[in-house]
Image (cartoon, rainbow, N blue to C red):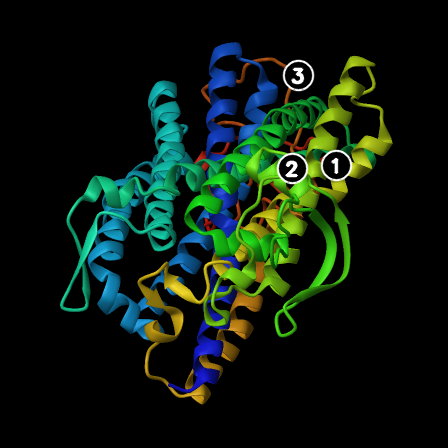
Amino acid sequence: MDLDALLLSRIQFAFTISFHIIFPAITIGLASYLTVLEGAWLYTKRRVYLDLYQFWIKIFAVAFGMGVVSGVVMAYQFGTNWSEFSRFAGGITGPLLAYEVLTAFFLEAGFLGVMLFGMKRVGPGLHMFSTAAVAVGTLISSTWIIASNSWMHTPQGHEIIDGIVVPVDWVAVILNPSFPYRLTHMVIAAFLATALLVGASAAWQMLRRHDNPAVRTMWSMALWMVLATAPLQAIVGDFHGLNTLEHQPAKIAAMEGHWENTPGEGVPLTLFAIPDMEQERNRYAVDIPNLGSLILTHSWDGQFAGLKEFAPEDRPNSTIVFWTFRVMVGLGLLMIALGLWGAWSRLRGKLHSSRGLMRFALLMGPAGLVAILAGWFTTEIGRQPWIVQGLMRTSEAVSAHAAGQVGLSLAIFVVVYFLLFGAGTVYILRIIDRGPEPGDGDAPPEGGPGLHNQPGRPMSAASGRSADGGDAGTGGRTPELQPVAANRGGMV
């Protein structure tokens, strides 16, 4: 097998999954957020929660559609680019992906239509149930996907018969050692990324003096969520790191840029360095003595395996994962700082007037998604050279394609993805730029949630015009209340 074809296949999969992972993360967080908003509206009858629901469901619909499209394309690569992996491990990954379709995707697809189009057509209770079902579906979907991926990191519950992985204990396969930590870490990351996106959207509106009850409410809710989830994510990350140290010590050594232990001394925490894989050392290292031991072994002078304890062909690329890990951790610390700043401003009564806090929140808007990508790169590149840890190398899993064939498909992916998903992202940003439209204070609307100033054209959600041609941004209303289906046309 030509090494260039292997490298190009890895780049292609990394490219497509990098696009894909962003949209499910948004939909996981937004689905739960929409459930909270609709529940709050039904309980309190405050119009502000309905305004926010109507605003964020537009973004959810676009993100959901792009997530489905990018996920289907990514899945096909298991057969086109990684056929040897599918032959070897398909007995595990195939059923897990099938369970995801049979449970999560059917649940989401079954209730998504009611969620998007049914506000006027079904009762409030059934519509609330549909929104919650979609939210549960996103969580079930992430459970099966993470179970499959976690098995590749910490495989359990199988036997190898005639060169093929055969499942013998599905409970052990699904509940493999890294699964609980990775699932919790990913779900919290999705909630945190969504909270940062919501907070940045509110900050953008308030900085432009487009202030209304809906904007203030989502600003407050977002900062509460950041305050709750950012420190929790750090705690979960610590447990995840200890689990990784136990089951994938080479990955931890690469993440820490740790080459070898000095007898009787603790391991320093390397803040900055350029790991040199050829010379087996760190260049320009800035270390804090013993802090690495304290974090990873919870003792002052504890030691863990360095990269030199593994054969060169079994070492992950420390030059990459050292920095992707630090990007993730650095952004996580900034998220904690944002949550604490928001809490301090709230206590001082300046939550809605601190423009410094708003600017910081605006800058942190994409930080959750960037951190997810950095964390994903860390965990996947850190598993190399194994595609299934200890069982199958990545070089053994690739299909027998020439480099030119893979290069051509990669180039096509790059062009199509930037055009298609770039357009979808611009559309989402246009909706965010417009912001939620203020309703009539906290007065409950007549006729149910679906009767609130619905745009009548597919792109009107971002055009700033209402269905009758009036200026929706200045409070224009249609002469007749529009059904919710008009608002959703062309979204998916």
> Which corner quadrant of the image does residue 222 belong to?
top right
Question: Which residue sits at x=50%, y=39%?
Answer: 242
Decide if residue 193 is in sight here.
no
How many residues crowd around disc 2 within 10 Å: few (fewer than 14), some, or many (20 or more)? many
* Quadrant occupied by the N terminus: bottom left
User: What is the C-alpha distance between the residues marked 3 and 1?
Assistant: 26 Å
Check contact, mark 1 vs mark 2: CB within 8 A.
Answer: yes
Q: Is residue 205 left or right of residue 244?
A: right
Badge 2 element: helix
Q: What label does residue 244 carry, if any?
A: none
Which label's residue is closer to the chain start, 1 or 2? 2
Seen as rendered, the residue at the extreme front is 264
Q: What label does residue 441 carry, if any?
A: 3
Amino acid bearing label 2: Leu
The x and y percentages for residue 5 are 44, 82
Q: What label does residue 361 carry, if any?
A: 1
Q: Which residue is mark 2?
A: 196
Amino acid bearing label 3: Gly
**Nearest to viewer (mark 2 / mark 3):** 2
In front here: 469 or 261? Answer: 261
